[in-house]
Image (cartoon, helix red, strand yellow):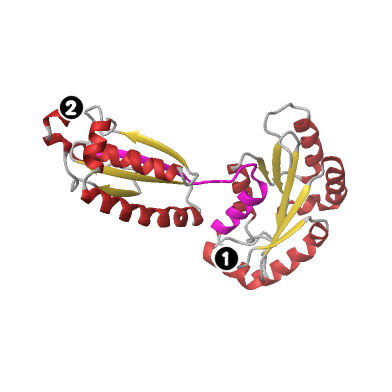
Amino acid sequence: MKENELKVVIVSGISGSGKTTFLRALEDIGFFCVDNLPIVMLEKFLDLYATSHRLIKRCAFVVDIREKEFFGEGKEVIKDVKKKYGTEIVFLESTDEILIRRFNETRRAHPLFHKGSVKEAIKEERELLQWLKDMSDKILDTSTMSPHELKNFVFKNYSFQEKRMKVNIISFGYSFGIPYDADLVIDVRFLPNPNYVNELKKKTGLDEEVKSYIARSDIYGIFSEMLWNLFSFLIPQYEKEGKSYLTVGFGCTGGRHRSVFVAEHFSEKVSSMGYNVTTIHRDVGR
């Protein structure tokens, strides 16, 4: 798909199969998303949207059983927008067993659940949506997929660029408190302290003299290798689980020397892995 083309995706499927998760993932990568838009309004909406000269020309709609009163006219509308805009239809489904389990876990009522069982409601829904499934470009069984895996499927197949977790790195001083938003905190107060060296006391971990002083320590060499072995393993695991950002704090006593140096070094190494890294030295000016 080219960036200057209008991309239209219709997400449909069986209730409980993950349509909301799919739509939110599309929204995260820049799609304009509408849930439960009446089918009869779809073509008019797209005609207006296509002529609005928006910079972002990607939109997605959920069409499902909640719109059953419009299904009589829906077939022709869907055919028209597929022909006119090259609309892609993605149909999500799961096994009855998984769907029933999901409804029990969330305690949500099936849209077609009346006096019968959830299983009977699912059967009726499959019959009503069969024509839409037959028209679909992709049929995705989410029975064995976690929400994170479903999001990753969307990122991989619909994003212009690969979705990467954002890594925030903060250096701080324990004297001023631990950052409240840190997911992981590493205490580096065991490293040689430049604060006790007169010519380094007024400098920071951004200065070459301080960097050299800490880096040439045998302790730092061992620590740096162990730390990187740990985090080069952990960061991809957090990303795999669908975490959108990770905040790592490095702390020393005052937040001016050791934590600043380690945070800078660590930032460079994480950046080399292709992640978007933001580095903040919270207390370096105190």
Highlighted range, magenta = 148-172
- Numbered disc 2: secondary structure: loop
Question: Label 2 neighbourhood size at 10 Å, few (<14), some (14-19), many (20+)?
Answer: few
* Image position, residue 33 (x, y; %): 66, 41
Residue at the spot 54% in from the left edge and 56% down from the top edge: 148
Residue highlighted by disc 1: 102
Residue highlighted by disc 2: 202
Horizontal side, residue 40 vs residue 245: left or right: right
Q: Is residue 158 magenta?
A: yes
Q: Nearer the viewer, residue 7 or 167?
A: 167
Q: Is residue 117 magenta?
A: no
Based on the displayed image, in which of its 4 quarters is residue 57 positioned?
Answer: top right
Residue at the spot 63% in from the left edge and 48% down from the top edge: 23
* Image position, residue 84 (x, y; %): 86, 40
Considering the image in quadrants, where does the C terminus appear? top left
Based on the displayed image, in which of its 4 quarters is residue 137 positioned?
Answer: bottom right
Residue 84 badge: none
Based on the displayed image, in which of its 4 quarters is residue 268 positioned?
Answer: top left
* Image position, residue 10 (x, y; %): 74, 48
- Eyeballing the image, is 50 above or below 214? above
Question: What type is the residue that disc 2 sits on?
Answer: Lys
Horizontal side, residue 204 vs residue 108: left or right: left
**Decide: marks 2, 1 in contact (CB < 8 A)?**
no
Q: Nearer the viewer, residue 265 or 60?
A: 265
